[in-house]
Structures are given as C-alpha cells and as structure tokens.
Amino acid sequence: MNFQLSCGTKPVFPQEPQMSSAFTQASFDFLHQLAQHNDRDWFKAHQTQYETQVRTPALAFIQEMQPHILALSPRLTAVPKKIGGSLMRPQRDSRFSKDKTPYKTNVGIQFRHFQGKDVHAPGLYLHIANDGCFLAAGIWHPESKALNAIRSCIDENPNAYRKAIAELGRHGFEMSGDSLIRPPKGFDKSHPMLDELKRKDFIAVKNIDPATLLRADLVDYCSRQFRHCNGLMAYLCFALELDY
C-alpha cells in the first residue's frame, strides 16, 4: 500500500484569528487548590468554583475550536459537552494505581477521531496543569492490532512518515511515549526505522508556557499548531484504515 499526504480535499481554514480569553489565572489556582485538598468532600464543597473557573472555560474553548478542528478533518470531533464530549472527566481511574486520590489535577481536552471510542483513538490533545502544559497529536497506547498496523505501514511507507515527523520537528514538536527495548517481532535490529518501529505510542508533543493559555488568541494559536500535526494524523489514520 502507498500513502499520499495529499489525499482528500485540501483543508480550508478560517482566515480571521479567533479571539478567546476563556481560561484565567483562576483556572490554574483551582487546580493548585485541588492538589492540596484532593478528596471528594472538598471537591463537592467547591463544585461551583470548578464549574466557573475550569469546566465552563474549557467548554467555551472547545466550542470556539470546533470550526478549526473540522477544517483539519471533518472526521475529528470537538464536542462541548460536560460528559461524553471532548473534555475529559475530572475523576481519576485509581483502580490499578497506588495513588488513590479521586481527582485529576489537570485539564485534558481531546479532539479525537469520530470512529474511535476512547482516549486510544488518534486525536489532538491539550493538557493544562500547573506542573506543565502541552499540545499533543497522535495515538496513545494503541491495542496490539492497531500497533502492528502502524508498524507495518512505517515499514512499507517510510518516506511519508519521515516527512510528517520532519514537519513536526520544524515547529517544536517531539515524538514521545513508551518504546520497546528490543526490536518488535518480525523486524530486524538493523532496520533503518528501528527506533520508530519500537514505539508503543505515536505521540508528538510540544510543551507550551502556561501563560499561553491566558492569551486572547489562544484558539488561533492552538489551531495553527495543530495544523503542523496534520501529516502525522493523516498517516496514522491511513495505517489504521480510518477515513481522514
């Protein structure tokens, strides 16, 4: 199979900068307080504060991002819903963790592929936290069938993958995530793309200053950064036989 980055119609992006001042210092302040008082009683007592300072700004951001996300691909979703949309829930899944604190001390927003049902689908991501903010694109912890499909695609179509990675690098993104220690089954240790084939996550990450989240042009900034990720997103969807 062969991959072409020019597949499909050319995206048409909104021309005017989209202005947004949804997030404020109060958003970060609430996350800091939550880290100090991470229990259900405290969260319940400060539910209104969470709604006003965190969830409402996040939903407003998702709403403003919607036309930009759809311009990247009509198969990506930007859903401003409290539950089941692009805003990830504040509750932690602590069933298999030693850390039993009930709430996340970050805000996670994912614009994922409509054919994916969870965080393991290809998507774009914004992470907001006091200990670090970043933009990301790609696929996190794909199950074995999907992982094998991506590796096979890189083996058969290395040039398009290299082009996508080079575009990311020019704009401050770096590939991140877990990797195998040894070559994956079926690939020789002398393979020219071995480091990429060993990946268990195909995620490109760009760290951003927390002050960026307070900028009036945040939506325009994020949409411009995500455009640089479109090559990787298109490649991963091609490998997984997903429309893009």
Image (spheres, rainbow, N blue to C red):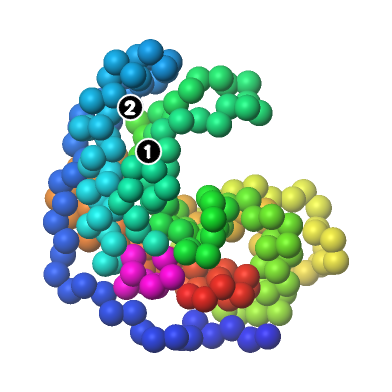
- Marks 1/2: CA–CA distance: 9 Å
Identity of the residue drawn at 28% across and 66% down: 68
Q: Which residue is mark 2?
A: 31
Mark 1 residue crowding within 10 angstroms, few (<14) / some (14–19) / many (20+): many
Residue 28 among magenta residues:
no
| Residue 133 horizontal/vertical position (percent) | 37, 41
Q: Decide if residue 152 is in sight here.
A: yes
Asked if the residue at tag 2 contacts the one at tag 1, i.e. Cβ–Cβ closer than 8 Å, the answer is yes
* Residue underneath mark 1: 107
Front one among 191 and 124: 124
**Sequence-first tag of 1 and 2:** 2
Query: Is the residue 70 above or below the residue 98 in the image?
Result: below
Element on which disc 2 rests: helix
Percent position (x, y) of residue 142? Answer: 64, 55
- The magenta stretch spans which residues? 69-76
At 63% from the left edge and 86% from the top edge, which residue is drawn?
A: 2
Question: Residue 225, image x and y in percent?
Answer: 34, 61
| Residue 165 higher or lower than 119, as above or below | below
Residue type for callout 1: Val
Residue 127 can be seen, yes or no: no
Q: Is residue 71 magenta?
A: yes
Residue sitting at 25 percent across and 55 percent down?
63
Q: Which circle marks residue 170 in the picture? A: none
Image location (x, y in percent) of residue 84 = 42, 47
Give the position of the N terminus as an image quadrant.
bottom right
From the viewer's side, name the closer residue of 178 and 125. Answer: 125
Question: With respect to residue 85, does 224 lie above or below?
Answer: below
* Amino acid tagged 2: Leu
Q: What residue appears at the point 44 percent right and 26 percent down from the top-left corner?
A: 103
